[in-house]
């Protein structure tokens, strides 16, 4: 069997293979390439009703927590770092493969910013719709939370403030995990 491949390569006509055009399999199979929005850089999504209620939690009642997180710039740094950690973590990296990271970065920032009362509106989908068919399990969720805790520690966010955000996010677990 190992001899067959080298023999086939020897029998190939080099002139024929040099003139053959590569097959565009996506075109041949009728698969259209998704185009990113030229302004946002995001891939299109099916329409949905935008509402702060989609954030999965009501915002905290004062802006003290937003201050502890460094306001919008601090929340953005934490969000960006969380995404970096998740993409590098072997426990969570596969979760993010093939996802629109531009959209995730924006909507996750908006969600944290809204919940922390830092002056943002949340424009993403509700948690159930956003995580539908992802198949997330308890171990995945635990790893994601550990990574969020690491991102918050790296930003020197006070421990009590970290816990207040985690308490706001915890009830979303039921909408995110696979049933």
Image (cartoon, rainbow, N blue to C red):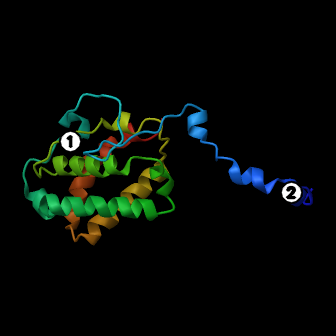
Does 152 sit left or right of 15 as displayed? left
CA neighbours of label 1 inside 10 A, class few (<14), some (14 to 19), many (20+): many
Nearer mark to the viewer, of 1 and 2? 2
Does 55 sit left or right of 128 as displayed? left
Q: Position of residue 71 (x, y in %)?
A: 12, 60
Residue 148 visible in this rendered orientation of the protein: no
Residue 112 visible in this rendered orientation of the protein: yes
Q: Quadrant of residue 52?
A: top left
Does 10 sit left or right of 175 as displayed? right
Q: Residue at x 71, y 54 (%)?
A: 18
Q: Position of residue 33 (x, y in %)?
A: 47, 39
| Helix, strand or loop for disc 1 | loop
Q: Of residues 103 and 14, which is closer to you in this image? A: 14
Q: Residue at x 10, y 49 (%)?
A: 119
Q: Of residues 65 and 122, which is closer to you in this image? A: 122
**Which labelled disc corresponds to residue 5?**
2
Q: Looking at the image, is 39 positioned above or below residue 156?
A: above
- Alpha carbon of mark 1 to alpha carbon of mark 2: how far? 56 Å
**Which labelled disc corresponds to residue 122?**
1
């Amino acid at each position: 069997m190992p001899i067959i491949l080298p023999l086939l390569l020897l029998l190939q006509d080099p002139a024929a293979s040099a003139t053959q055009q590569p097959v565009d399999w996506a075109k041949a199979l009728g698969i259209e390439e998704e185009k990113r929005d030229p302004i946002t850089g995001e891939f299109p999504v099916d329409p949905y009703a935008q509402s702060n209620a989609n954030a999965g939690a009501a915002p905290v009642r004062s802006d003290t927590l937003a201050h502890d997180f460094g306001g919008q710039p601090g929340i953005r740094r934490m969000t960006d770092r969380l995404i970096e950690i998740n993409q590098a973590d072997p426990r969570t990296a596969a979760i993010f493969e093939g996802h629109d990271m531009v959209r995730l970065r924006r909507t996750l920032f908006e969600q944290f910013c809204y919940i922390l009362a830092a002056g943002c509106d949340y424009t993403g989908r509700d948690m159930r719709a956003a995580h539908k068919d992802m198949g997330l399990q308890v171990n995945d969720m635990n790893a994601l939370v550990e990574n969020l805790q690491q991102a918050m520690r790296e930003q020197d966010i006070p421990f009590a403030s970290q816990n207040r955000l985690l308490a706001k996010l915890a009830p979303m677990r039921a909408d995110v995990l696979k049933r």
